Image (cartoon, grey):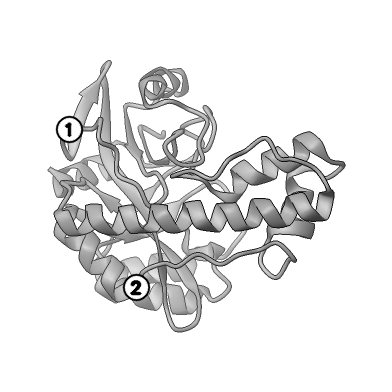
Amino acid sequence: MVVADLHVHTTRSDGSLELADVPAAARTAGVEAVAITDHDRINPHLDGPLTTRDGVEVVHGIELRVETDTQRLDLLGYGVDPTEELVAECERIQRDRRERGRRIIECVEERLDASLPVEPREGLGRPHIARAIAEVSDYSYEGAFEHLIGADCPCYVARDVPSFERGRALLADACGLVGLAHPCRYDDTEAALARCAQLDAVELCYPYGFAADTDPVADAVEAHDLLPTGGSDAHDDRLGRAGLDAAGWHRVRDAVV
């Protein structure tokens, strides 16, 4: 039984839920704890690494994209107590997101000869742009990624992200627990899991990972003495599709407080 969904996005990045609406969504899903893990942003309205809102325990988290020599990975930091260095890096990334968003929007508008109902801003991600494309064109949300803004597509613009080493260090200084997100999602899962030697945790349970072979993830947990984490990676209000049971949540909770 899932009691903790430790991968949830809000409108502060590319989710649809306001922070204030998360507890109600959690209760609807029968979830007792959530982690707010917005992309490259900490939340100024979460005033501690772990707080309680409307009876739901809320972990202040972050999902940070980093660069390795072969691929980009997503790190999850749990129990954020912001440092000046992490705040500064998040601000730099958001400036890059605004500029990247502007370039993508301009490219798409030129190709479609249409105006997109979206503006460059902090927290802007390609999902926002894909939704806007679907509103004004014959492309679906998925088609926008496949033909226009996905990697290697004509309007794709890469982000400037920190190295794995810098990102890990920033999170380690500010968080109680640092883990690898959705390891079976990367092109080279083996190389991604090798990075866990420098981490505290790895995401074992997530709704789109079960089709992949999770044995290597379990092997990494044992080899590197990692805490298994899990969550729905919710960008909507459907929480609890994946996560931790009570025993797994208590182990993570102890690590972040």
Most extreme residue toward the right is 138
**Along the viewing direction, whichever of 108 and 171 lies nearer the viewer:** 108
Task: Tell me where residue 220 appears, x and y as whole percent.
Answer: 36, 71
Task: Tell me where residue 104 appears, x and y as whole percent.
Answer: 64, 56
Residue count near mark 2 (Cα–Cα under 10 Å), binned few <14, some 14–19, many ≥20? many
Task: Tell me where residue 2 appears, x and y as whole percent.
Answer: 41, 34
For the point 27% across and 67% down, which residue is it?
168
Most extreme residue toward the left is 257
Residue count near mark 1 (Cα–Cα under 10 Å), binned few <14, some 14–19, many ≥20? few
145 with respect to 255 (left or right): right
Work out how far the residue at label 2 is from the one at label 1, CA to CA, in angstroms.
27 Å
Q: Which amino acid does label 2 sit on?
A: Phe
Quarter-wise, where is residue 64 in the image? bottom left
Quarter-wise, where is residue 158 in the image? bottom right
Residue 112 higher or lower than 232, as above or below = below
For the point 33% across and 66% down, which residue is it?
221
The answer to whether residue 138 is visible is: yes
Quarter-wise, where is residue 54 in the image? top left
Total marks shown come to 2
Quarter of the image with the N terminus in it: top left
Quarter of the image with the C terminus in it: top left
**Along the viewing direction, whichever of 73 and 250 lies nearer the viewer:** 73
Q: Which amino acid does label 1 sit on?
A: Asp
Task: Name the residue carrying label 1.
Answer: 47
For the point 21% across and 40% down, which residue is it?
250
Task: Tell me where residue 29 appears, x and y as whole percent.
Answer: 46, 24
Helix, strand or loop under label 2: helix
Residue 220 higher or lower than 103, as above or below = below
Task: Name the residue carrying label 2.
Answer: 164
72 with respect to 80 (left or right): right
